[in-house]
Structures are given as structure tokens and as C-alpha cells.
Amino acid sequence: MAHKAGRGRPDRTRVQLAALVVAALFLVLGVAGFIPGITTGYGDMTFAGHHSGAKLLGVFQVSILHNLLHLGFGLIGLVAARRLAGARIFLTVGGAVYLALWLYGWAIEDDSAANFIPVNGADDFLHLALGFGMLALGLLLSNNRGTGGRLDNPLDRP
């Protein structure tokens, strides 16, 4: 990373800043899932499975596993955002993972054994928005730095 003259911190790209914001969001969600009051039905939270009665903000079904996954994803994002390529990978691959999770949630029954994370209809819509949002940030904020050229002039064309 390049350093700006007269400043002690690195000059971050837009995609790195976006990855930091998304990672911080996941960390906040992961922690909030363990706070009674922010999470309704906190006493009904299970480690995993659709039997967990806890809901983040009274809407999004969560479990201990679900919260730990948010925390882990947030930590991965913080580490990945340190480098330009890592930030892009975090946002694009993470976006694809969340779109796959949306499809998974859409395909399974809410009360089936396959719903081990657990997810409900509200989670499904959130995963859809996160998936497209992360993909858009990872692909559209990729600027000239680190690409070897402008994105609209691929290397294989004259």
C-alpha cells in the first residue's frame, strides 16, 4: 500500500474501505446477536437449528452458530481489507456466498432439519441484498490500482 506524504496511515482504496465497512457491519451483527434486548427471545437461542427462538431486532432468526458465523466473516473481512486484492476477493466471493445462502434459504423449509444455521424469510431477503450489494461493491469499486490497466481495456485486446 502506498503512503500519503506527511501521513502515517496507508492510503486505502474505495474497495478496501467498502470491505472494512462490510466487515464492521458483520462484526456488529455478530455481537448484537448475543445481546438480550437487541435479540428478542434470547433465552430460546440454541446452538444451531431451526428450533432457535431468538430473533435479531425481533425479525432475523439467529442462533449461536449464526452469530459466530457473522463474527468470523467480519474478522475475515478485516484481515482481507488490508490488501487491495483481499478486499476485492472478500466482497465478490462473499457476495457469491450470500447469494448461495439466499438460494439455500429459499429452497429449504424453515422447519426442516436442513435449516441448521437457521434462516427465515427475513434472513433470505437480507442475504439477497447482501449478496448483490457485496458483489456490486467488489466489482464496481475496483479502480485502476493493482489491475495493471483500466478495467474497460482488457489485456487481451489491442
Image (cartoon, rainbow, N blue to C red):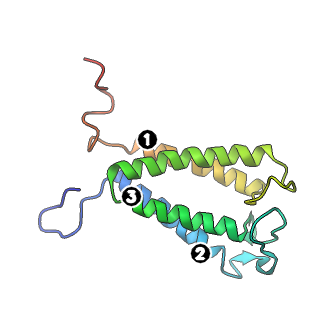
Dot 3 or dot 1: first in sequence order is: 3
Dot 2 or dot 1: first in sequence order is: 2
The kind of residue on which mark 3 rests is Ala
Q: Residues within 10 Å of mark 1 (few under 14, many from 20)?
A: some
Residue 132 visible here: no
Q: CA distance from mark 3 to mark 1?
A: 15 Å
Residue 155 visible here: yes
Q: Which residue is mark 2?
A: 31
Q: Secondary structure at mark 2?
A: helix
Residue 2 x %, y %: 19, 56
In this rendering, the answer to whether 18 lies above or below 65 is above
Q: Is residue 53 left or right of residue 139?
A: right
- Quadrant where the image shows the C terminus: top left
Q: Which numbered disc covers residue 139? A: 1
The kind of residue on which mark 2 rests is Val
Q: Is residue 49 left or right of residue 17?
A: right
Q: Which residue is mark 3?
A: 81
